[in-house]
Amino acid sequence: MKKNTSALVIPTFAEYNNNTPKQPTPEQQVLIDEYLESFTPKICCLESCWSQAMTDPPGVKPFIKAIPWMIEKEIGYAYRIISSGHDLEYYVKYPTGIIWNDPHLAGIDVFYLAAHGKPRGLMTSVKDIESEGLIKAWNGLERYFNIVYFSGCEVLGGAKGQEFVQEFRIKRLQEIHKKFGFTTQEELQPSS
């Protein structure tokens, strides 16, 4: 099923500078749609056990496997169980983590971290992962545009959760901005 994807085409810098982007022509829209359709979206899910009972139903893997049916488009996915911050780093830490060295995982769009949550951290079956461990594990992720989805309750909630959001966001922004030569804290402040 072909989805109608609209995009703005900015043919010249002057138009960009004047904030007057033009809608694509029908011919351009066909090329844009074909280009966007050429990519296979990818999800990497790292999940911790939700329960110690071995007879409990599976976690989020059935949901991930159903996504292509729900969105009517094939996706690539990777899935693993994690039990600690060490496991998380094994898969995602730059440059040695599995996701950086497996060509099938290049270009992941969504990182889905599924585990019970607590303020500023995740609970896993072996050892909780505190905010410092989460931030440390994701160092390097700023090299690519993607979404990090924490599904654990309370991870981002309350004052402690908001502190974690700020730490995580600022750390990623600092790494991204280093590439472009920004050096002062003022340049990292969110725009209003």
Image (spheres, helix red, strand yellow):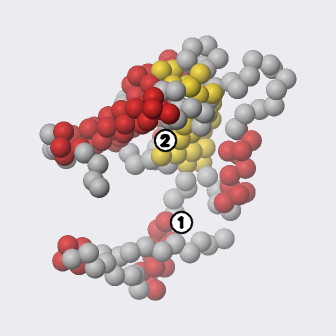
Would you say residue 68 is visible in this rendering? Answer: yes
For marks 1 and 2 on the same chain, the one whose residue lies earlier in the sequence: 1
Residue 173 image offset from top left, x and y in percent? 30, 41
For label 1, the crowd category at 10 Å Cα-Cα, with few meaning under 14, some 14 to 19 and many 20 or more, is some
Verify CB contact (< 8 Å) between mark 1 and mark 2. no
Q: Is residue 67 left or right of residue 131?
A: right
Nearest the eye: 129 or 62: 129
Q: Residue at x 64, y 56 (%)?
A: 74
Nearest the eye: 165 or 182: 165
Which of the 4 image quadrants contains residue 82?
top right
Cα separation, mark 1 vs mark 2, equals 22 Å
Q: Residue at x 48, y 79 (%)?
A: 30
Would you say residue 138 is visible in this rendering? Answer: no
Q: Residue furthest bottom?
A: 26
Q: Amino acid at mark 2?
A: Val
Nearest the eye: 38 or 42: 42
Q: Which mark is residue 139?
A: none
Q: Amino acid at mark 1?
A: Glu
Q: Residue at x 61, y 52 (%)?
A: 75
Q: Residue at x 64, y 17 (%)?
A: 125
Q: Which mark is residue 37?
A: 1
Residue 86 image offset from top left, x and y in percent? 50, 17
Tell me the residue that label 2 is attached to. Answer: 148
Q: Is residue 86 left or right of residue 151?
A: left
| Quarter placement of the C terminus | bottom left
Residue 53 image offset from top left, x and y in percent? 80, 19
- Mark whose residue sits in front, 1 or 2: 2
Name the secondary structure under disc 1: helix
**Image mark count:** 2
Q: Is residue 167 above or below residue 9?
A: above
Q: Is residue 102 left or right of residue 151?
A: left
